[in-house]
Amino acid sequence: MTVLIVEDERTLARELGIFLHQQNFTCTVARTAREARAHLADTPFDFVLLDLGLPDGDGLDVLAEAKQNELTAAVIILTARGAVEDRIGGLELGADDYLAKPFSLPELLARMHAITRRRFGLHKPLVSCGAFELDLQARRVLHQGQEVNLSVKEFDVLSYLVLHKNRVMTRLQLTEHIWGNLPEAGFDSNYIDAHIKNLRKKLSLLADVEWLETVRGVGYRARL
């Protein structure tokens, strides 16, 4: 998933970026409120990790403005502020969680997984799709208990479609989800078509994949 890290402390921002990249998240860093606003206006993120004490403004103001602009990303506030008022303020503005600094990176990841499950109404990490199961936390696809060999990007495409089941996802939505900031990623819209083709080829060797549909001229849909 795509993550905007809003953090002015360079060491922490770098540690977050490295850790989340290792967990197959695509990360963008903003070190000021101004940079955060610009990224939020240009790119649809899945998560925003938001520090409150920014050099040019308050993170709560960034959150309030983003919510007014119909921000859909999940927001976790990461801050050294310990006052109850700050926590309540952030949650009332629409933040999904609040983590006080210093914090454990594995705990942050667990909270992100928990938010994902809540958002998509999942009660367990295994999600069914036809004759297959997606293990979202282990990032595996299983067929009759055996792992299917998929690339990182193939899993990203499949999991995004399955989590948004029965909805048509455009090529642009899929590309933004996987590669983040498009102009900087050297993307090609044909990448999505190639990944779908490879997914169908690999999965159809094991079971029917008619549920993985092409919506001509628009994109793809997991009809489940």
Image (cartoon, rainbow, N blue to C red):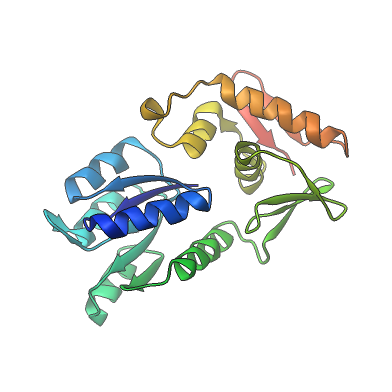
Q: Nearer the viewer, residue 143 or 214?
A: 143
Residue 159 as seen in the image, left or right of residue 99: right
Q: Position of residue 168 (x, y in %)?
A: 61, 34
Q: Position of residue 48 (x, y in %)?
A: 37, 54
Residue 148 as seen in the image, left or right of residue 16: right
Residue plotted at (47% across, 35% down) = 179
Image quadrant assignment for residue 92: bottom left
Image quadrant assignment for residue 105: bottom left
Residue 48 visible here: no
Residue 31 as seen in the image, left or right of residue 76: left
Q: Position of residue 71 (x, y in %)?
A: 36, 49
Residue placed furthest toward the left? 56
Q: Nearer the viewer, residue 34 or 31?
A: 31
Residue 100 visible here: yes
Q: Relative to 96, say whether 57 is above or below.
A: above
Image quarter where the C terminus lies is top right
Residue plotted at (11% across, 53% down) = 56
Q: Position of residue 74 (x, y in %)?
A: 42, 56
Residue plotted at (31% across, 43% down) = 40
Image quadrant assignment for residue 171: top right
